[in-house]
Image (cartoon, helix red, strand yellow):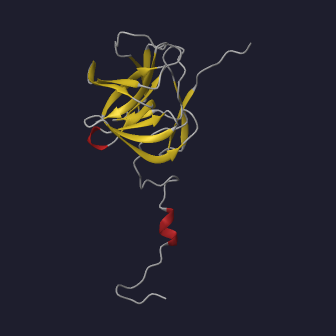
Amino acid sequence: MADWIEQVELYSLKSDSWKEISVPGVYAFVSILFNNYINVFYYWQASGDYKLILSFDMVNEKFSTLPLPEFGGTLAQCYLELLDFNGLLGAILYPCEGTDKSFDLWVMNGSWTKQFSVESVPGVERPLGFWKNGEMFLESSDHELVLFDPSTREIKNLGIHADRETMRIVAYVESLVPINGRQEHEESIVRRPAGGASN
């Protein structure tokens, strides 16, 4: 039987090279693709120990661990989703069973504090993330993307359908940094005199 070895390598655009980074303990990542990037840190739930969150500091290039919120239950009864909540690490906990889900949002700001609870949202499978004004993206029990307003409890169907538990909300920021260190688009710019006619 083969042993799995966790190896992490970091690529630098500046030096065009790879560097191996040591990982604390024997932790694996629950989700490689759908991690959370918040204020120079990446966060994952560690699968080697379900009571920990693994973080990677992009500035210091080091891994560290955080505890899960003390929510009074077990992860056998609840799912955990990590997300960005107003620039802080957030964790939504919700029950594994049933289609009338309630959600607890915990926020890490030095320590975990419960931010709020949303009681019994009918026809919802799982939370996906937050939108403007505290609205939440949820996956409905028929696997459609919906927007839920906790203050009015209104649910708006967004008309997007996916297979079970494949839907994700991923935040991104566009960048003008070129991939290979030069501005490739400059070679294809056609310069015309100001006010000149175009063909």
Vertical placement of residue 101 versus 171, above or below: above
Q: Say whether residue 99 is visible.
A: yes
In the current view of this chain or complex, which residue is farthest to the front? 122
Left or right: residue 174 compared with residue 26: left
Closer to us: 117 or 32: 117
Which of the 4 image quadrants contains residue 103?
top left
Q: Quadrant of the N terminus?
A: top right
Which of the 4 image quadrants contains residue 51?
top left
Give the percent coordinates (x, y) of residue 49.
49, 13
Give the residue displayed 53% in from the left and 35% down from the top: 33
Left or right: residue 110 compared with residue 57: left
Give the residue displayed 46% in from the left and 13% down from the top: 77
Give the percent coordinates (x, y) of residue 198.
45, 87
Q: Say whether residue 170 is visible.
A: no
Give the percent coordinates (x, y) of residue 153.
30, 35
State how many labels appear: 0
Left or right: residue 105 compared with residue 13: left
Give the percent coordinates (x, y) of residue 48.
53, 15
Closer to us: 193 or 167: 167
Give the residue displayed 45% in from the left and 40% down from the top: 169
